[in-house]
Amino acid sequence: MIDLLASLERWASERPAQPAFTWDGGAIGYGALRRRVAGAAEEFAALPPVVGLLAEDGIDWVIADLAAGAAGKTLVPIPPFFSAQQIAHLIADAGVAHVLTDERLQPLIRPLGMPCSPVPCREAAVLPNIAGGRRLIYTSGSTGTPKGVRLGGAQIGHSVRALAQASAAGAEDRHLSVLPFALLLEQICGIYLVLHAGASCHIAAGAAARCAEGDPGALLKACEAWQPTTTVLVPQLLAALAGGYAALGRKAPVSLRFVAVGGAAVPAALLEAAWASGIPACSGYGLSECCSVVSVSRPGSRSHSAGPPLPGVTVEIEDGEIVVSGPTVMQGYLGGAAPEGRWATGDLGHFDGDGNLVVVGRKDNLVVTPNGRNISPEWIEAMVERDPRIRRCVVVCGADGALTAIVTPADTLPAPGDLAAAVSVAVREAPAYARPTLCIPTSEEVIAGDGLLNGKGEPRRAAFAACFSGVAGPSLKIEVPLEFIAS
């Protein structure tokens, strides 16, 4: 955190009136931000060594984050979208002894009997210069049990500097912050990278939640009003933004120069739709264990890949698995051994001819067919999801060994035969052994109602296989010859 505090000192001295962060109805310049961080850090000195942060996205979240680092505390961001059980586990596992929170979210902490307080509003003139501040990042993972990732100033500092180089970040940038600050990705890009570059950030609190409810209006309004140069989105938000502009019949602001998209695989059809709407979407790949970002497409590129690795980050492919080495690799899981600068990600991938990383899927999701073939379901799913008529595809292996594509359409439900034909065409480039032979139409409502997704919105594959095992009626064998359809 020392590098970031030095950046704050620099911009507060050189450009104290320049807005560092804005939000609907307010703004704070670099000079005032330094004074508030300094004041909060003085009060944080009396807090226990490990402090939790559970607050709404806003300037208080930013100040608490920076002040905890300045006071040498271990900060544990608490995602408000975690369940009560996950929050209790996180607090106990990390040894949190005090929580910084706000009035609205305090009820999530009160049942735990944990001391808590609001983020202080007082100011001070001098920032402390205490080394040793670190953070614990908890991710829900595929099992729902949060695991603590230990990160220090070295990992965060290198990640920020590498991202600044990869994205060509500068003081003239206007970042639009949409993702929750509880996510490491937005901490890195929406707070630290902004401070490093001396740029400005607009906090569009609530826009992501509105999009998740099917209303992209707040996101579109923020884009139009703020005219940002950069933002970071997940695929769902990119789809909402591109769809919103397409519905309006106009392009996104020409000010946008770099829209990083991560958190999940980005279908090629979505990238194409974004580019058609004037959104310079750049897909990336990363994980908390490697300080959030491992690779990203560069500004101006139009690649369906996850782009080249960040400067100073080494990516190797070992037996098909992505292995990351370098200064952004975590210090280790809480209570676990240090990985010594090298992390086997569990993801499968390869490099294309231009040195871009192509992520295929999870190693532990491999489907083994009765004839001994290993298939990454994400590989086939990505092919199917390129069709704009298909919103989601989940490939599982049925009890009889048949590969099954469980598909939700993007709009109204077409005839089962039409959907099966679309799947058959989409996978025509895959080898015969990897092509699904059964197509089962369903809906997003059924998937959500049956609890078939984990906390990150990813499919629980065993649950999918069990839920749709033996389904008849709308299911249909994919028997249309590929050559006939392609012609």
Image: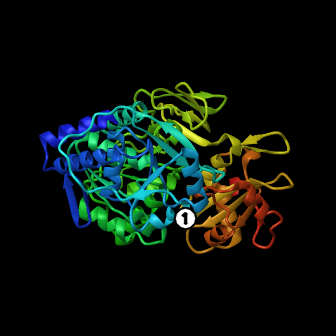
Residue placed at 53% from the left, 34% from the top? 352
Q: Looking at the image, which is closer to me, 335 or 199? A: 335
Name the residue nearer the viewer: 244 or 286.
286
Residue 198 screen position, x and y as percent: 22, 42
Circle 1 residue: 111
The image quadrant of residue 111 is: bottom right
Residue at 30% x, 38% y: name it: 4
Residue 29 appears anywhere in the view: yes
Q: Position of residue 33 (x, y in %)?
A: 22, 49
Please state which of residues 221 and 32 is positioned toward the viewer in this rendering.
32
Is residue 282 shown to the viewer in this render? no
Residue 291 % position (x, y): 46, 38
Q: Is residue 86 above or below residue 250?
A: above
Element on which disc 1 rests: helix
Answer with left or right where residue 6 lies relative to residue 162. left
Q: Is residue 328 above or below residue 470?
A: above
Q: Quadrant of the N terminus?
A: top left
Q: Tell me where residue 230 appears, x and y as whole percent.
A: 31, 50
In the image, is 361 to the left or to the right of 172? Answer: right
The three-letter amino acid code for the residue at tag 1 is Pro
In this rendered view, identify the residue nearer to me: 404 or 43: 43
Above or below for 243 versus 332: below
